[in-house]
């Protein structure tokens, strides 16, 4: 990691580097998705190459799987690993209770499955992602492609009466076409601005027909490692 990093990338990198200190020989490790998680996968690859660290990594996306293989990590599926010792992943927002919004990179379905199949989840992030109340970042909701417009309308209905400040729902695009996740689904982004009761929101959204999984991670994260542009690292 010799090239000069921007302050934001430096923050992500130092958080990632600190997190890989928690990885021990023989562990089965969930590998998150996104730019911060990519730094972590590279740091882990360095430990594998330089220290002979033996781990099995379970990637949370096809992107992460490709990077993990490239840096020499032994990649296995979650079904092969069965259960994980630790997952390290990024986030889009986190609050004082270590609840998260994830899915900005479109991988929150696999990320949630992997994180909840782990003894421990460590989130790595830059300081700008810490919020008092979740919701400024649009909440990703993965939905089945079939009838997604009906699902969007139903989500709009359940938002009425919820403690939110906005109700716009947009279909995530990839250029001119709808974004398609690794599982073949679409993503609706909910522009709620403020989520007064994230626990209730997470439960209610997953009751809507067509919803596969929402990006709220409630009581899943155990520790947040926050990096700063000047190289400082804090743990929450
Ligand atoms: C992907 C995610 C990412 O962890 C989240 O979007 C943060 O990404 P980045 O580290 O690039 O800021 O949830 O689904």
Image: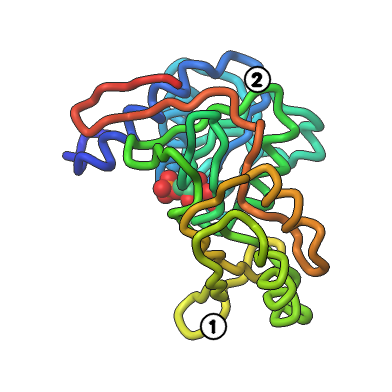
The color scheme shown is: rainbow
- Ligand 1 within 8 Å, label 2 CB: no
**Is residue 184 in sight in this rendering?**
no
- Measure the C-alpha gap from mark 1 to mark 2: 39 Å
Locate residue 129, reporting x and y percent. 39, 41
Q: Residue at x 75, y 33 (%)?
A: 117
Report which residue position mark 1 lands on.
177
The image quarter containing residue 197 is: top right
The residue shown at (63%, 34%) is: 30
Q: Position of residue 42 (x, y in %)?
A: 42, 35
Between 108 and 207, the one lying in front of the other is 207
Q: How far across and down, in percent of the image, does residue 2 sit?
A: 22, 34
Q: Is residue 47 left or right of residue 196?
A: left
Dot 2 falls on a residue whose secondary structure is loop
Label located before the other in sequence (1 or 2): 2
Q: Hey, which residue is sitting farthest front in the picture?
A: 161
Q: Residue 203 shows which numbered tag?
A: none
The mark closer to the camera, 1 or 2, is 1
């Amino acid at each position: 990691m010799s090239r000069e990093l921007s302050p934001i990338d430096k923050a992500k990198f130092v958080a990632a580097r600190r997190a890989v200190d928690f990885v021990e020989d023989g562990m089965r490790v969930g590998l998150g998705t996104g730019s911060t998680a990519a730094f972590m996968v590279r740091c882990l690859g360095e430990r594998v190459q330089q220290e002979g660290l033996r781990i099995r990594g379970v990637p949370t996306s096809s992107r992460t799987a490709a990077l993990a293989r490239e840096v020499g990590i032994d990649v296995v599926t979650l079904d092969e690993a069965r259960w994980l010792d630790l997952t390290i992943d990024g986030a889009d927002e986190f609050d004082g209770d270590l609840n998260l919004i994830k899915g900005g990179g479109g991988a929150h379905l696999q990320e949630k499955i992997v994180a909840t199949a782990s003894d421990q989840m460590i989130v790595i992030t830059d300081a700008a992602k810490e919020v008092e109340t979740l919701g400024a970042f649009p909440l990703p909701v993965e939905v089945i492609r079939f009838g997604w417009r009906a699902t969007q309308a139903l989500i709009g209905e359940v938002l009425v009466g919820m403690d939110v400040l906005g109700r716009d729902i947009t279909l995530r695009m990839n250029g001119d076409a709808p974004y398609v996740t690794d599982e073949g689904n679409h993503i609706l982004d909910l522009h709620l601005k403020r989520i007064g009761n994230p626990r209730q929101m997470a439960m209610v959204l997953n009751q809507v027909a067509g919803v596969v999984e929402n990006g709220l991670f409630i009581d899943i994260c155990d520790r947040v490692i926050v990096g700063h542009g000047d190289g400082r690292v804090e743990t929450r």
